């Protein structure tokens, strides 16, 4: 079935460690996004990519990094510079500019906890 | 500034009651799209509806209906005869043109947690 797969579902990080969250899609979508969800704050955009080998900062990019080497993959690295990384992270995709304003498809999320 | 406001943080109803979730948006653009998503306990956001800024017709899909009013910048969502399976967090979101093109970025409201009691 086509969709977006995020892994792992739960992730624990020690202080000072970098961790990478995986996001893979088989929908042949050009655009991919990473959102962070905190209680009472809705979803906030971290990074997005509209095409392979290109990505843009969202509203809260500090302490995060991404890459887009393949169309189907958009991994997010939470670096030690992110002071409060405990949150629920959601990856999304949509067809991109070919179909403007289409709905996004979301993965099931990764819950990251700093221990 | 672009903004989506969902003033209702939590709503609790008893099964079979009707419930309306409010959404108010701000945007400087004349072309924009509004969305509603449902987030069940599993965490994945499920798309419910998309409406563009030029179409103010209300829409009904089964027990769900949406009321879009540009005059008040609102896009409210009503569930008729609520069921326990409707319990979830519901998000309203805005997508707009940017620099003459669509990045398809979504600006989300803070969500409304709906609890339907049996």
Image: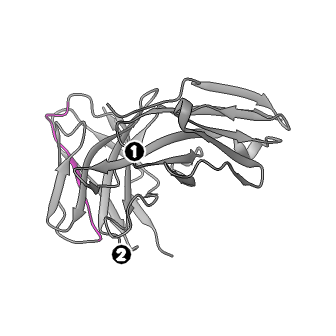
Answer whether residue A79 is magenta in the image: yes
Residue at image coords 13%, 34%: A81
Q: Looking at the image, can residue A66 be seen?
A: no
User: In the image, is residue A108 above or below residue B3?
Assistant: below
Residue B8 appears left or right of B99: right
Residue placed most toward the observer, A28 or A113: A28
Residue placed most toward the observer, A67 or B77: B77
Identify the residue under disc 1.
Answer: B30
Residue A59 appears left or right of A53: right
User: In the image, is residue B11 above or below residue A104?
Assistant: above
The C terminus of chain B lies in which quarter of the figure?
top right
Identify the residue under disc 2.
Answer: A28
Give the number of the mark in front: 2 or 1. 1
Residue B6 appears left or right of A29: right
Residue placed most toward the observer, A103 or B66: B66
Point out the stretch of residues depicted in magenta: A72-82
Q: Looking at the image, can residue B33 be seen?
A: yes
User: In the image, is residue A29 above or below residue A48?
Assistant: below
Residue A37 spot, x, y in % from top left: 40, 37
Question: Disc 2 is attached to a residue of which chain?
Answer: A
Question: Disc 1 is attached to a residue of which chain?
Answer: B
Residue B40 spot, x, y in % from top left: 60, 46
């Amino acid at each position: 079935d086509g969709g977006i797969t995020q892994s792992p579902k739960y992730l624990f990080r020690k202080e000072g460690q970098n961790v990478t969250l995986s996001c893979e899609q088989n929908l042949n979508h050009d655009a991919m996004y990473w959102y962070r969800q905190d209680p009472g704050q809705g979803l906030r955009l971290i990074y997005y990519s509209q095409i392979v080998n290109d990505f843009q900062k969202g509203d809260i990019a500090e302490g995060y990094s991404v890459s887009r080497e393949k169309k189907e993959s958009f991994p997010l690295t939470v670096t030690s510079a992110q002071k409060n990384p405990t949150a629920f992270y959601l990856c999304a995709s949509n067809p991109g500019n070919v179909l403007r304003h289409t709905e996004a498809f979301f993965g099931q999320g990764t819950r990251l906890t700093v221990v | 500034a672009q903004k989506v406001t969902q003033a209702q943080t939590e709503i609790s109803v008893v099964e079979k009651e009707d419930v309306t979730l409010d959404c108010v948006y701000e945007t400087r653009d004349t072309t924009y799209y509004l969305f509603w998503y449902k987030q069940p306990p599993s965490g994945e956001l499920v798309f419910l509806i998309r409406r563009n800024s030029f179409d103010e017709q209300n829409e009904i899909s089964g027990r769900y209906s949406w009321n879009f009013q540009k005059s008040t910048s609102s896009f409210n969502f009503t569930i008729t005869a609520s069921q326990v399976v409707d319990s979830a967090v519901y998000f309203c979101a805005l997508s707009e043109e940017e620099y003459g093109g669509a990045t398809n970025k979504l600006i989300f409201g803070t969500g409304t947690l709906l609890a339907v009691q049996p």
